[in-house]
Image: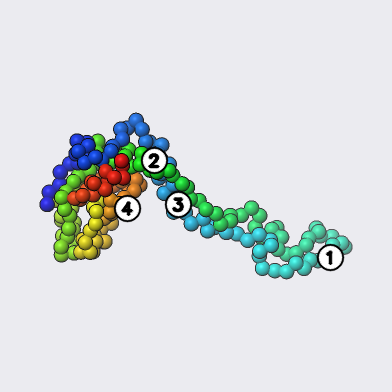
């Protein structure tokens, strides 16, 4: 099992469309912003004076006490009262068009190819399912760092071997996203994952 550099010529012959450095920077920014916004739960919530526990009884009479006029104890100025203009549940999600997604993917792939950070290997499998074997195999293929291994599919033993390795991630070519590519130091393309990328960048 040996890996070779995935060059711009290889991408062209495999019909993988790459974007040059003059286009796509804003698309990458918009897409990563959308990824992170979509992960926000938006569940922060405070209760108004109409929602906190308590009754509507006037805390003391209107006149004759020398105190300010007040109604019920759920007013915002009292401890345990409602909150004024506090956070309410909301949806932070953002939508990004297909054309922007493709442009961002092409731009990031193009940058990685130009940097020589993408390698290609015909197959990748850890038959014994051992983490030690997984680490030694990767060490023989790539340089140290955060490694993204992209394939069409992986068998159960390979997933088992990789699950405790924090600096390496197995991902299918269909699930691969721009943020994962940006965070990786090197990318290992396995087998016909290149064909899937060609479809996604066309």
Residue 116 percent across, percent down from the top left: 22, 39
- Specify the quadrant of the image occupied by residue 118: top left
Q: Which residue is mark 3?
A: 38
Check if mark 4's residue and mark 1's residue have beta carbons within 8 Å.
no
Look at 78% across and 62% down and name the residue there.
Answer: 71
Q: Separation of disc 1 and disc 2 at Cα? A: 66 Å
Q: Which residue is mark 4?
A: 175
User: Is 192 or 159 nearer to us in this picture?
Assistant: 192
Q: Separation of disc 2 and disc 3 at Cα? A: 19 Å
Considering only vertical position in the picture, is 64 above or below 18? below
Residue 64 percent across, percent down from the top left: 87, 63
Residue 2 percent across, percent down from the top left: 12, 49
Q: Please identify, in this view, whether the residue under mark 1 or under mark 3 is nearer the observer.
A: 3
Label 2 sits on a secondary structure element that is helix
Q: Earlier in the sequence, mark 1 or mark 2?
A: 1
Residue 10 percent across, percent down from the top left: 19, 39
Q: Please identify, in this view, whether the residue under mark 4 or under mark 1 is nearer the observer.
A: 4
Q: Dot 2: within a 10 Å radius of its alpha carbon, few (fewer than 14), some, or many (20 or more) residues?
A: few
Check if mark 4's residue and mark 3's residue have beta carbons within 8 Å.
no
Q: Which residue is mark 1?
A: 61
Label 4 sits on a secondary structure element that is loop
Considering only vertical position in the picture, is 134 above or below 102? below
Look at 55% across and 54% down and name the residue there.
Answer: 90
Q: Which mark is residue 99?
A: 2
Q: Separation of disc 4 and disc 3 at Cα? A: 16 Å
């Amino acid at each position: 099992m040996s890996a070779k550099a995935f060059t711009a010529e290889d991408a062209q012959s495999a019909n993988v469309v790459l974007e040059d450095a003059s286009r796509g920077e804003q698309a990458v920014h918009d897409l990563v912003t959308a990824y992170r916004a979509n992960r926000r739960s938006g569940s922060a919530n405070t209760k108004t004076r109409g929602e906190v526990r308590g009754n509507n009884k006037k805390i003391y009479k209107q006149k004759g006490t020398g105190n300010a006029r007040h109604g019920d104890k759920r007013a915002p100025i009292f401890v345990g009262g409602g909150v004024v203009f506090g956070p309410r549940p909301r949806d932070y999600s953002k939508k990004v068009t297909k054309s922007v997604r493709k442009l961002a993917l092409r731009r990031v792939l193009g940058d990685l190819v130009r940097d020589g950070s993408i390698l290609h290997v015909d197959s990748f499998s850890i038959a014994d399912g051992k983490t030690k074997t997984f680490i030694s195999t990767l060490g023989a293929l790539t340089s140290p760092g955060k490694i993204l291994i992209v394939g069409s599919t992986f068998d159960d033993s390979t997933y088992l071997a990789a699950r405790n390795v924090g600096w390496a991630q197995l991902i299918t070519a269909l699930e691969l996203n721009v943020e994962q590519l940006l965070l990786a130091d090197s990318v290992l393309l396995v087998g016909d994952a290149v064909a899937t990328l060609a479809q996604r960048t066309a």
